[in-house]
Image: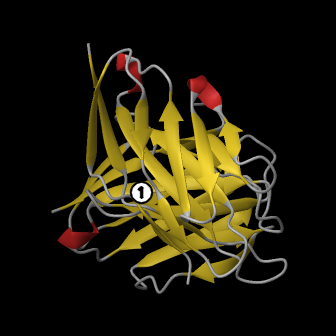
Amino acid sequence: AQSVAQPEDQVNVAEGNPLTVKCTYSVSGNPYLFWYVQYPNRGLQFLLKYITGDNLVKGSYGFEAEFNKSQTSFHLKKPSALVSDSALYFCAVRDIAGIYNFNKFYFGSGTKLNVKP
Amino acid sequence: ETGVTQTPRHLVMGMTNKKSLKCEQHLGHNAMYWYKQSAKKPLELMFVYNFKEQTENNSVPSRFSPECPNSSHLFLHLHTLQPEDSALYLCASSQDTASASYEQYFGPGTRLTVT
């Protein structure tokens, strides 16, 4: 079964410092991994995805994520945090239910990022 | 957020009421999803429709009844809900379900409170 884990409920970082939001995954085949962000009173917004290829994936708003197969991790990173990055971040893995049936995303429980001025 | 819209944004209903949530996507997608988001819990997938056909029912109680009249619209009909059904209900869409690389686009959600 596919699953993702976000081990930190909350991450606190000072503005201008680098940030990391952690995600580990468990899949039975090749992983299809995604990061989403949720601002207050809003739906989830897609940030970036890893399907294949380069282990470092670049996404929206200066975020990037590093796929590490040996550690089964897909941590979200940003070199310099902004106060406006404060939000809830979700890691997700796509379930390969069948050859042409990719119905399900499995989401982590979310990590709240607090960026302080 | 004009890509995926949801109405109403907030809903308070009694346990004996019948209400419906509406979702509309303006992205030309063919797959639509309902999720339940409760505090400090992972998003729970409820239903999936692909080209108007239901392809996933994730063991959802029958008091939740989905309807997908076309690829752009998705409804969730609610009947005889319980207080534990109070949550944020999110609608999402994607190109379709034939490729694992397609990301989902979410609406802002309907905050449901069952009294």
Residue B43 point in image, percent of width and height: 43, 62
Chain identity of mark 1: B
Residue name at image x 26 percent, y 12 percent: A117
Q: From the image, tell me which residue sits under label 1.
A: B89
- The answer to whether residue B25 shows anywhere in this view is no
Q: Is residue B55 above or below residue A7?
A: below
Residue at the image point whose x is 39% and y is 19% from the top = A84
Instruction: Confirm whether residue B4 shows in the render.
Output: yes
Across and down, in percent, residue B7 comes to 48, 45
Task: Judge whether A101 appears above or below B95 on screen.
Answer: below
| Disc 1 residue type (three-letter) | Tyr
Residue at 60% x, 66% y: name it. Answer: A70
Task: Please determine whether, in this image, residue B21 is positioned above or below residue A83.
Answer: below
Tell me if mark 1 has few (under 14), some (14-19) or many (20+) residues whose alpha carbon lies within 10 angstroms of its own: many
Q: Is residue A12 left or right of residue A3?
A: left
Instruction: Please indicate whether residue A6 sits to the left or right of residue A26 in the image.
Output: left
- Report x, y in % for residue A19: 41, 32
Quarter of the N terminus of chain B within the rendering = top right
For this orientation, the residue located farthest to the left is B115
Q: Is residue B45 left or right of residue A30?
A: left
The part of the image, by quadrant, that contains residue A63 is top right
Describe the element under mark 1 as helix, strand or loop.
strand
